[in-house]
């Protein structure tokens, strides 16, 4: 099982402390630290995923449960008309994030905020978060990583101008969080509130077909 690089400091640190506690004869402490090490291995797991989608499909950027699948909430969305799909990630979910559509990253924005529980509606506009804007043939898809009450750090590994492919890994959130996805008007939703989705696998929506540019 692959481990996300962000997890190794946690895994190694707790494992070393467990070893020290064992050498010093503190077996209960060593056991607790070994359990913590196992949790970190579980949390930072990064399973391989096979992404098979059509040209207009939007794939889930994360594992979790769909909280919103509707027209975007005005106070949470960027200016304009959008559809919104929000996914809540519990500490038991895989927290590696994946690219929802193939395109080019046009913007990466970090917004400093608070640490409200990620399931609360106001978390989308008030919590610490990172947005990536992806241009897909003239259409924009926005993927927002949002921290929660436990998740205190976002890792985003893409940059402006970078070509990206649907399903590829681009970051991780620690330790419980949400993803907000904003899609162009006219997109067709394929999921409903309460659905369980899998990052890099589940089709969330289809985008309006990109119209070819006619050269006169």
Image (cartoon, rainbow, N blue to C red):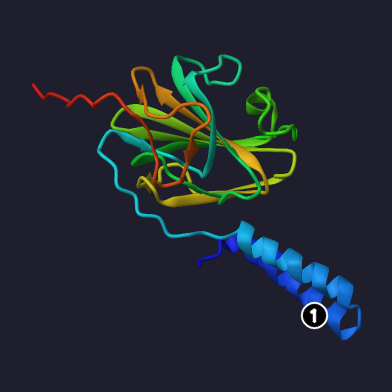
Residue located beneath label 1 in the image: 19
Residue shown at the point (29%, 47%) measured from the top left: 52
Label 1 crowding class (10 Å Cα cut-off): few <14, some 14-19, many 20+?
A: some
Q: Quadrant of the C terminus?
A: top left
Residue shown at the point (48%, 46%) measured from the top left: 159
**Residue 99 horizontal side relative to residue 110, left or right:** left
In percent of width and height, residue 137 lies at: 28, 32
Q: Quadrant of residue 83?
A: top left
Residue shown at the point (12%, 23%) measured from the top left: 214
Residue 104 visible within the image: yes
Q: Quadrant of residue 177?
A: top right
In percent of width and height, residue 111 lies at: 64, 33
The residue most toward the bottom is 23
**Residue 93 horizontal side relative to residue 148, left or right:** left
Mark 1 element type: helix
In percent of width and height, residue 117 lies at: 72, 33
The residue nearer to you, when weighing 24 against 145, is 24
Residue 156 visible within the image: no
Residue shown at the point (46%, 45%) measured from the top left: 198
**Residue 212 horizontal side relative to residue 77, left or right:** left
């Amino acid at each position: 099982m692959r481990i996300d690089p962000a997890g190794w400091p946690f895994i190694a640190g707790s494992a070393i402390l467990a070893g020290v506690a064992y050498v010093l004869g503190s077996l209960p402490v060593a056991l607790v630290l070994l359990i913590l090490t196992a949790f970190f291995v579980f949390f930072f797991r990064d399973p391989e995923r096979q992404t098979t989608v059509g040209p207009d499909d939007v794939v889930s950027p994360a594992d979790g449960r769909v909280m919103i699948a509707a027209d975007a909430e005005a106070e949470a969305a960027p200016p304009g008309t959008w559809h919104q799909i929000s996914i809540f990630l519990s500490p038991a979910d895989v927290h590696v994030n994946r690219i929802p559509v193939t395109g080019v990253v046009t913007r990466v924005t970090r917004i400093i905020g608070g640490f409200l529980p990620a399931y609360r509606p106001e978390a989308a506009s008030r919590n610490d978060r990172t947005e990536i804007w992806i241009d897909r043939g003239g259409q924009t898809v926005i993927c927002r990583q949002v921290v929660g009450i436990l998740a205190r750090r976002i890792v985003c590994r893409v940059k402006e101008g970078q070509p990206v492919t649907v399903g590829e890994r681009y970051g991780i959130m620690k330790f419980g969080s949400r993803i907000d996805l904003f899609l162009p008007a006219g997109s067709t939703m394929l999921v409903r509130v309460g659905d369980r989705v899998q990052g890099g696998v589940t089709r969330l929506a289809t985008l309006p077909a990109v119209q070819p540019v006619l050269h006169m």
